[in-house]
Amino acid sequence: MGERGTAGRDVDHVLAFDRRGGVVTVVCHRNAPSGLIDQPGKEWWRGFCTDVTTFDLAATGCCT
């Protein structure tokens, strides 16, 4: 199950494309783990954009 009840089928489509001989490349991104604003214009599904979350990546210490 995806975020907030969504159900993705991307992997199913990729596997089917591969079986048909397609060349597969997968790229993904993640939403912020917390601090989603989730208001009109700043919906949860845009949580990978810095303007729709209050999550402070620098505060995690991962990017020093």
Image (cartoon, rainbow, N blue to C red):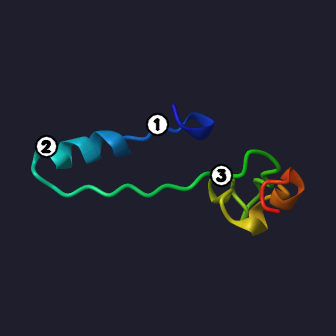
The residues bearing labels 3 and 1 have C-alpha atoms spaced at a distance of 15 Å
Q: Residue at x 49, y 55 (%)?
A: 28
Q: Amino acid at mark 3?
A: Asn
Point out residue 43 in the picture as x, y percentages from the top left corner.
69, 57
Q: Is residue 4 above or below residue 28?
A: above
Q: Residues within 10 Å of mark 1 (few under 14, many from 20)?
A: few
Counting the numbered discs, the total is 3
Q: Amino acid at mark 2?
A: Arg
Nearer to us in this view, 30 or 35:
30
Q: For the residue labelled by badge 1, is the local secondary structure a helix, a strand or a loop?
A: loop
From the image, state whether disc 3 or disc 2 is nearer to you: 2
Question: Residue 31, which numbered label?
Answer: 3
Q: Residues within 10 Å of mark 2 (few under 14, many from 20)?
A: few
Please state if 41 lies on the left or on the right of 2 as rendered.
Answer: right
Q: Residues within 10 Å of mark 3 (few under 14, many from 20)?
A: some
Q: Is residue 29 above or below residue 12?
A: below
Quadrant hosting residue 23:
bottom left
Q: Give whichever of discs 1 and 2 has the lower sequence position.
A: 1
Q: For the residue labelled by badge 3, is the local secondary structure a helix, a strand or a loop?
A: loop
Q: Amino acid at mark 1?
A: Ala
Q: Give whichever of discs 3 and 2 has the lower sequence position.
A: 2
Question: Residue 19, which numbered label?
Answer: 2
Find disc 1 in the rendering and name its residue: 7
Point out residue 34 in the picture as x, y percentages from the top left corner.
79, 46
Nearer to us in this view, 5 or 23:
23
